[in-house]
Amino acid sequence: MPGQLPPGGHSITLQVALNLEPGGNCVSAISEFRDETAAWLKENCPEGARGPGQVATGSTKITLESDVALWLERMAERGWTAPVWPTEYGGGGLEAAQARVLAEEMGKIHARAPLMGMGLSMIGPTLLEYGTDAQKERHLPKIIRGELQWCQGYSEPNAGSDLAALKTRAEDKGDHFVLNGQKIWTSGGAYADWMFALVRTDFDAPKHDGISFVLLTMDQPGVTVKPIRLISGTSPFCETFLDDAVADKDDLVGELNKGWTVGKRLLQFERSGIGGLAGGRRPNPGAGLVKVAKDYVGMTDGHLADSAVRKTVTSFNMNSAAFGLTAKRANEENRSGTPGAATSMFKLYGAALQQDGAELKRMLMGTRGLGVDEGFDDVELNATREWLHSKATTIYGGSNEIQANIIAKRVLGLPD
């Protein structure tokens, strides 16, 4: 009969496939975890941390709203700011399935993430893989507790897509490096407490071989940050100038002159976050789309009044759901941590999906989706900002062209 096990059975195979212990019940364990998590979230997530609003980044330079600070404190105490990180550093120690349940239950009550930023999504995972025990013990607990914010010192004015052409110099001074050079597009640099950076420590070696990966504090005399104003009206990106800035030798991650390997791995973690592979709550590019369509296009007999709009919105939401399920499957199939070059596929499509969602939302609003002044409400103004900001998604984290090259070489195995 279809679905029946053959004589002799494959019960062990079935148990492994379902992640069951012989005689055990994984489904009931997850169900119990879900019930406990839902109850805890309902009781402990403040109203001021639900729905749109402020999210903690860990910056010591930003004052948190009281409910946001309380939410961060409560989640960090459980390790749920970094739910799958090891408990020895303060993480939650959850299995992937449990982390998904946590994300789902947070979504049901519209709970915002307790913490976000490059500490969790980029440098933290990199330190878990490449950091020394001392580096992990020094930096990871502070990231988990949201006690500081990190920024990225990679791109330079003449080293963007060709990142290995970077010129920022780090001179070895015994127990520390002295850094001189300029970084650009430093996201969050004006609010960051620490930077992770790629610097050149050997100018005579081939360009990929003379790079090192270092950590440095932003609040020191040799660091100057200048925000760059964008067309969206915000200034998340900055220029960062390093003039005899200092990075301790203890904060050299990986081997001297071998930082390119560490730096590439961090980029995979970054692209995993943009592409929805990082676990937890993936940003929904279609969030609020149906409500916008209802409010601005209208309803007839319980359906969107315009059939073309109905088809377009449905198609986008199907693509978004399929993308999310594919990312989930990729995470489940990958047993070695973040997937390698495949992250570029998710970053490439995920960026396009975010752009499409912002564009569609703006179009549904018509002229109200181009709000820039007092004549528009907050929803309309945010839609405009989201649309403008989305233009950068196919550039930051590695441009579409870079991702396509990686996919061609590392995934498809095509010749140069």
Image (cartoon, rainbow, N blue to C red):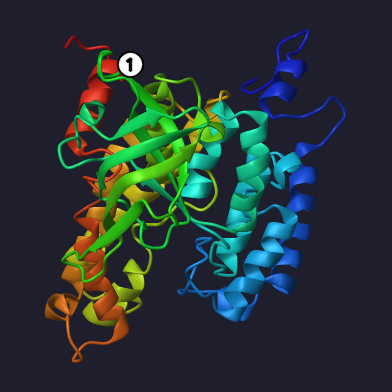
- Left or right of 52, for residue 115: right
Q: Splitting the image into 4 quarters, where does residue 147 fall? A: bottom right
Taking the view exactly as shown, the residue that stands out farthest to the front is 173
Within-10-Å neighbours for mark 1: few <14, some 14–19, many 20+: some
Residue 249 in view in this figure: yes
**Residue 69 in the image, given as x and y percentages of width and height:** 61, 72
Q: Which of 393 and 200 is in front in this view?
A: 200
- 372 vs 57, left or right, is left
**Residue at point 18% right, 76% down?**
369
In x, y percent, where is residue 149? Answer: 49, 56
Compared to residue 236, the image places residue 383 above or below, namely below
Q: Residue furthest left?
A: 367
Kind of residue at disc 1: Asp
Which residue in the structure is indicated by mark 1? 209
- What secondary structure is marked by label 1? loop
Q: In which quarter of the image is the N terminus?
A: top right
